[in-house]
């Protein structure tokens, strides 16, 4: 119960400190599972917080990455982004690590949907020390006006 309350406080805090929001689902390798609730909070014209919460393996995985956005990529409404941030798994095992992120994002014109794909290498630092360089994901999000 404490974990759910903490998660709600973090998400509400991001909500009040952000300018634009996107909410959806992430498919791919995530700390704690293969599917997650995916949220993107724009903090300025060129930065965002990309957060994921996954439920799997008897616990909750949370990643919150600070990304720098580079736009546009050519003449199409596609941006690329790079960033890093903490990764935490709370369950029978406790894992704490640092993840990097490199991705492409496309917002469909005249439709409030964005699609992005990213690569997220992760160093697990606490409980066991490992590196996972094979973490790729596909994100489908609704863009709030």
Image (tube, helix red, strand yellow):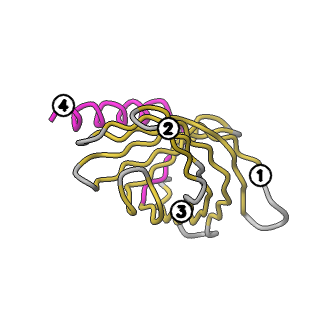
As helix, strand or loop, the secondary structure at mark 1 comes to: loop
Q: Which residue is mark 2?
A: 129
Q: Quadrant of the N terminus?
A: top left
Check whether the beta carbons of the residues at disc 4 and disc 1 lie within 8 A of each other. Answer: no
- Going from N to C along the chain, the mark reached first, 2 or 4, is 4
Task: State which mark lies toward you, 3 or 1.
Answer: 3
Q: Which residue is mark 4?
A: 2
Q: Which stretch is magenta?
A: 1-24
**What's the residue at 32%, 36% (across, down)?**
94
| Disc 2 from disc 4: Cα separation | 27 Å
Q: Are marks 3 and 1 in contact (CB under 8 Å)?
A: no
Q: CA distance from mark 2 to mark 1?
A: 35 Å
- Lower sequence index among marks 2 and 3: 2
Task: Please name which of the two marks, 2 or 1, marks the residue nearer to the observer.
Answer: 2
- Which image quadrant for residue 89? top left
The part of the image, by quadrant, that contains residue 84 is top right
């Amino acid at each position: 119960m404490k974990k759910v309350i903490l998660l709600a406080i973090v998400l509400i805090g991001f909500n009040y400190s952000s300018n634009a929001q996107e909410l959806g689902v992430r498919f791919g390798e995530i700390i704690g599972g293969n599917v997650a609730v995916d949220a993107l909070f724009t903090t300025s014209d060129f930065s965002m917080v990309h957060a994921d919460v996954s439920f799997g393996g008897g616990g909750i995985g949370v990643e919150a990455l600070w990304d720098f956005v580079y736009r546009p990529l050519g003449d199409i409404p596609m941006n690329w982004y790079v960033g890093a941030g903490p990764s935490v798994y709370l369950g029978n095992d406790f894992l704490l690590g640092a993840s990097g992120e490199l991705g492409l994002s496309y917002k469909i014109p005249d439709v409030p949907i964005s699609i992005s794909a990213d690569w997220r290498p992760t160093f697990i630092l606490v409980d066991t020390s490992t590196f996972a360089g094979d973490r790729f994901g596909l994100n489908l999000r609704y863009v709030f006006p």
